[in-house]
Image: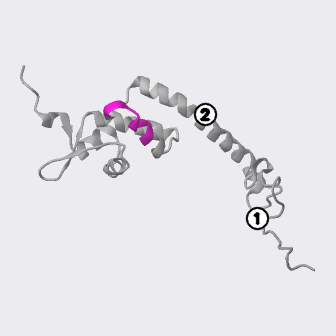
Amino acid sequence: MPQIPQTLHELSVGQLSARSGAAVSALHFYESKGLITSSRTSGNQRRYTRDALRRVAFVRAAQRVGIPLATIRDALAELPDERTPNHEDWARLSEAWRKELDDRITQLHRLRDHLTDCIGCGCLSLETCVLSNPDDINGEKITGSRLMPERKQSTENCS
């Protein structure tokens, strides 16, 4: 059986961009962050294997739901032999990311619900501002409008 030339299995950065919908600059950025890899031709041009299409799709889908690139990179690094993520990988990872996303959604709902309470007031009150001090977490520690480390007063020089 004749072998298919390797060049038919490789994509230039422009071809990968056109097929994936990601800008060339985004592909270069993904590569710099270790999300995709390329080889170089003798003319120093990048060449990507076709599985880079699926990796780029995986990265873009994860980004759309708010997963940070570092988290995506760590997830891809867990795959054996840098293999391309499949449906089962996405299902497993998306389940793991669900809690993080739920927490962010809760934060965004709180922000939305209290946004009009704070805009323009300029108070920055750590006692009452639900944006600067959610659930009054700072009120348990200190009072006042600034978060500064408390200084211990020396009693050695007091008479």
Within 10 Å of disc 2 (Cα), the crowding (few <14, some 14-19, many 20+) is few
Which residue corresponds to the image point at 43% horizontal and 27% vertical from the top-left? 89
Within 10 Å of disc 1 (Cα), the crowding (few <14, some 14-19, many 20+) is few
Which residue corresponds to the image point at 42% horizontal and 39% vertical from the top-left? 60
Q: Amino acid at mark 1?
A: Gly
Sooner in the amino-acid sequence: mark 2 or mark 1: 2
Q: Where does residue 87 sit, x and y in percent of width and height?
A: 41, 24
Q: Taking 113 as reference, is 54 left or right?
A: left
Q: Is residue 145 visible?
A: yes
Which residue corresponds to the image point at 72% horizontal and 44% vertical from the top-left? 110
Q: Nearer the viewer, mark 2 or mark 1?
A: 2
Q: Where does residue 11 sit, x and y in percent of width and height?
A: 21, 40
In terms of depth relative to the viewer, which is nearer, 116 or 49? 49
Direction left: furthest residue: 2
Among the 4 quarters of the image, the one containing residue 159: bottom right
Region in magenta: 73-81
Question: Which residue in the structure is indicated by mark 2?
Answer: 99
Above or below, 106 relative to 4: below
Q: Where does residue 126 sit, x and y in percent of width and height?
A: 79, 58
Question: Which residue in the structure is indicated by mark 1?
Answer: 122
Among the 4 quarters of the image, the one containing residue 5: top left
